[in-house]
Image (cartoon, rainbow, N blue to C red):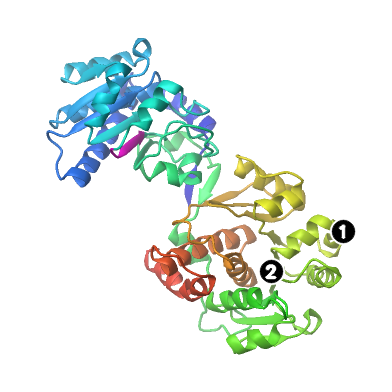
Amino acid sequence: MQGIWTTERIRAAEERLLAVTPDGELMRRAAFGLATQVAALLAEETGGVSGRRVVLLVGSGNNGGDALWAGAFLRRRGVSVTAVLLNPEKAHPAGLAALRRSGGRAVSTADGPRRISKADVVVDGIVGISARGPLRPDAAQLVELVEAPVVAVDLPSGVDPDTGAVDGPHVTAARTVTFGAVKPVHVLAPQECGEVVLVDIGLRPSLGEPDLHRLEPADIAAAWPVPGPEDDKYSQGVTGIAAGSATYPGAAVLASGSAVRATAGMVRYAGHAADVVRARWPEIVATGSVTDAGRVQAWVVGPGIGTGAEGRDVLRHILGQGVPVCADADATTIIAHTPEVLDARDPDTPLVLTPHAGEYERLMGHRPGADRVSAAREAAAKYDAVVLLKGYCTVVAAPDGRVAVNTPRGSWLATAGSGDVLTGLVGSVLAAGVDPWLATSAAAQVHSLAGALAAADVPTSASSLVDAIPAALRLIRATSH
């Protein structure tokens, strides 16, 4: 898994490393990596490096120093470099001196617009990871003029480093070059960071355990159920689906089909859409009631079941079966309005909740807010459940504090029925006996990848998403080695 560390942890690790490193060495190491990435982007965008024009937007912190030193390194490759100093009196002295020795120029903000208009690449060195809030007016005015690709130093200025939240003017980067470790902003605000490149400056031994995680293909491939020579349809995991209704059968068809495509050994459907589900997926064992469904290793419950007395009875029955449960959609609303249904649950039985922001508000009494990681952790602790908080970036929190973040591959999953597909995926991996937090995190990643494959940069549907699941799994296995 890829580790992600909060800015507080990063700063503490940097202080420990600085104490045993020659003065200025870490900054020069970081700046050389930054310069390499700026040069690479220049070559990609313009076909060359020498003779190209780079403008540095330089603030008063160490990120400004990184930008200035990077400018000095770029000068060695024949790049024309101009630093626009937002606060000349507080510009990093050694970095500014190095830029000037190399032949680079430093100008005031008054000359900034003219320089920016001619830039091939702009480097954002305005603020660092200690900053909070939007850009100040002078910086915002300059950033608004930028048309060239932006390389952000450590993070896009004006984006919160720990939550990825944006509250006013900010930088949107084509590439973000970060140093030592991935920070929360890089996975929570990918639309602002662009491509994230990590430069190793020797920080990892000083960091300790990560605060957040992002699953890699090898993690998903290792967790996903794969049948062995001794397996049969029962040993691979039987997934139960309680979803949909006679009037609205779509949720049932999508959740059930998702579980089938996810290679569940067997899928049982129970509900009023049994005939429709059976017609679409003949391999599913379908019945009209959860009391007649037979034994399963995990249940998916909620999409389209309604929030009335019948829906409550279905949820209560499933929670009392002593197997992992993924509760989605109407099931989360029932839990929010009649929390006593949870009395049927064995406290040792895993529960997964998959709310979007509105459902989260019903469950918790308040919106998730800008800090979605803390929001997911809060809900996980309250309900003693794994909580998958839906959104552009999916956050998965376990009651023990573990958090995984799924960085999306576009916004194509914002389509009707997408959540039903996700619950089927979660249920199929739960039924295989995988740790609930890992199962939910892996399902979210497969869901995201399937969405990207189904869309191929054009709008898609939830039905196409179901059909793309096998391709997503094949790709994950192929890239996990």
Q: Please give left or right for residue 333 compared with residue 7 in the image.
A: right
Specify whether residue 19 is in view.
Answer: no
- Magenta stretch holds residue 424: no
Q: Which residue is mark 1?
A: 340
Disc 1 residue type (three-letter): Glu
Q: Please, is residue 42 above or below residue 324 in the view?
A: above
Disc 2 residue type (three-letter): Pro
Place residue 139 in its image quadrant.
top left
Q: Please, is residue 300 above or below residue 246 in the view?
A: above
Residue 248, position as x, y percentages in the image? 69, 76
Q: Please, is residue 260 above or below residue 204 in the view?
A: below
> Is the C terminus in the top left, top right, bottom left or bottom right quadrant?
bottom left
- Magenta stretch holds residue 151: yes
Disc 1 residue crowd, few under 14, some 14–19, many 20+, Cα 10 Å: few
First in residue order: circle 1 vs circle 2:
2
Q: Which residue is mark 2?
A: 303
Residue 305, position as x, y percentages in the image? 74, 71
Distance (Cα) linking label 1 and label 2: 20 Å
Which segment is the magenta one?
148-152
Place residue 309 in its image quadrant.
bottom right
Place residue 51 in its image quadrant.
top left
